[in-house]
Image: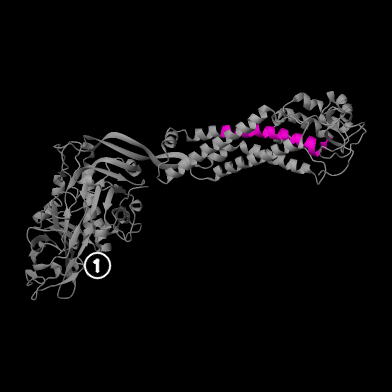
Amino acid sequence: MSQSFEHFASFRKSDSVSSSGSQSQFPPVRRFWDRTGKWALFILVGESLVLLGSLGFLLFLWKGADEAAADRDPGERWRAIVFAGWTTRAITIAAAFMRTAATAQDAFLTAMIAALFLESSGTKLRHLPALSVARAVSPTPISLIGLNLFDRRPSIGIIYWVLLLVTSLLWIGSQFTSSILLSDFADLSIAGPNTSAVIKTMTSYGEYVTYTNYFGASPPFFPRFAEWYDSSQSQEVHPNQPYVDTGPTLRAAVPWINSDERLGLRYYEGASRLWDARVTCFRPEFTNLTLVLERRPYTYTVTGDFVCHDQRPVVEPPDDKCSINCTFNAFTGALICGTNALSSTETPLPFLESEKKSKMIIKSNLIHASSPSVWPDDAKPSIRIGGGDGDWILKKEGPWMKSFDSNGRETLSFSSCIMDDLLYNSNVSMSGPPAPSEPVMTWLETPEEETRGSLDTLEIRRQLGVTPGSSTLEDRGILSLELAASLLTVEDVFNRPVEPYKYSPSIEAGLYSVNEGRPVVFDQVSSIDPNIWMVPHEFHTAIFLHILSTTNNPAKALQALSTILNHMQAFDRSTTWTAEQPASYIMSREVSIPASRDGLLAIVVLVAVQHVIMAVVVALFLSRTRATLLGNSWQSVAQIISPETLEVLLQADDLKDSEVRRSYLDPAAKGLVRRHGGRSQFVKREDPGLDP
């Protein structure tokens, strides 16, 4: 083709365009739905609703995930989707809807942009067929992005090309909607559904339980438990205070044998073993105190009388005098001895009706200070402690009454403690986040020798709440016990009042036996005789002595020991649990849910940009085109037939585009669709100026 087209300008109502004759005016402007086509209008509006609806569903899933991760209620519908395993499938389905909607919209936007090139900015002749047909078939935007569609700068065609580029990027991004959204997902542990079930939590009344020496046995594990605690009434060790008090404390066992279930428990309401874990210890005021030496075998017996209370309205014993008679050998460590102190159910101390037992905790340093091996044969068979004429003197220090020998070396320290020895069957409510693990007893990494002192008890002491500093229940890995007024009078599933659950004979051989003069000796050396006193397992010894050495608080040491023994008894009976009781609980469930917002934010941006581009393109199409009716194939073909294109069309029936460009087209030829000779057709413009 020898003819060279001049540059064509944008369409204006006052344009005068002609290549061979006079111009004909455009017919009246059609209604906008005729120009866009009802199907295109339906796609643009309807698919926007699909995009926004899908986006709302995604926001619902992400918000629910945030609520669940924060241990708040995400809603019943959200839980139904997640626990049915439909989360990722729902994302895939929503992404498919969004991808389909965006693709359909982008196709019609591409057709509108093609019309803008043809009618507004003009295009090169070689792109005319592609752009004109695009108005009818609505292709993907990427099919036109490679064309050099604007003629020369500055040109409004640059704006149209940018719109086409952004539409292409939106189309490409929409193909990866599912992958972008799923990039936010991770496996998280959240609260599962509330389950009601009948579970076994204890042994039926009257069933026989075999004997186990819990003091001499190793704790099989250190299970998490639930705790209620009133810190306002507690008292830490202070030199000027004659007592220490753990404060009102209730603890309950988590009634699951499996450790994973205990760790994953978030909420439980039902029957459990409950005990009053409050312990108060005070400095005994001795009226007489004597240490008697027996040489065969070498043993000590400490006897004396003391005032039974700490001058607080916590305990009101039958009388003011209590006595101690305790036999032990020379050792460095501590022991628990019984006293003849109160057995009361009418004191302000217990939360439940119980039998409060008094224990005397004695810290001994005799093996270093006054061992029988260094006593002369003519030494006194007994030593008076305290008083004006005593052999050893007594000094007050916080909750301890300490004795010192004539050389000023500390020998014995005494503290009298009140505690509860009973377990209770009770309905409880406990809640809290899951725990990562339960503590275990380990050896220190580089022990000098494998003795009791080389055991690492830090994690266990942290769980029991006796490490320095304040730790939350979550930090300790335990649950919060709900304290309700009904807890004190609740009836269990057997329709009988809550009853104390007596310790088994194994416990009687431990804590109860101290009331009979047989102490529990926590010794760091192996010189103790199990025929004379109770020999605790080295784990019990390490924990008890570590707490005393790090806190100097006998109440916390006794509270920790009681908790461990209560758990050993409760779970030792787990194989014989037969009493079925109704309960409701919530366990942790590991599910795949959104854990971040980056992918969701990217999709929100894509949807927002999609609608901005759609609004701009539709506005430009309606304002700057007149001759295009989208989706009409015959019109699209007819408008490219003109004197300027006829020669090419007559020769191109058996040629490739590249062959047409080489043989028949001038590379610089440009034009646009305009009204001419009574019809809209591709024409050249007489005004060679730039586009407005």
Front residue (pair 681, 62) = 681
Start and end of the magenta stretch?
A: 95-124
Front residue (pair 557, 367) = 557
Quadrant hosting residue 307: bottom left
User: Residue 249 colored magenta?
Assistant: no
What is the secondary structure assignment of the residue under circle 1? loop
Residue 197 rendering spot, x and y as whole percentages: 29, 34
Residue 479 visible to an observer of this rendering: yes
Residue 240 rendering spot, x and y as whole percentages: 22, 70
Magenta-drawn stretch, dominant element (helix, strand or loop): helix
Above or below: residue 134 compared with residue 9: above
Q: Quadrant of the C terminus?
A: top right
Quadrant hosting residue 310: bottom left
Q: Which residue is mark 1?
A: 238
Q: Is residue 359 left or right of residue 92?
A: left
The residue at 23%/56% (across/down) is 541
Three-letter code, disc 1: His
Above or below: residue 637 compared with residue 407: above
Mark 1: few/some/many CA within 10 Å (<14, 14-19, 20+): some
Q: Is residue 179 left or right of residue 349?
A: right
Residue 329 rendering spot, x and y as whole percentages: 14, 62
Above or below: residue 152 compared with residue 51: below
Residue 219 visible to an observer of this rendering: no
Q: Seen from this angle, which residue lies furthest front?
A: 28
Residue 210 rendering spot, x and y as whole percentages: 16, 40
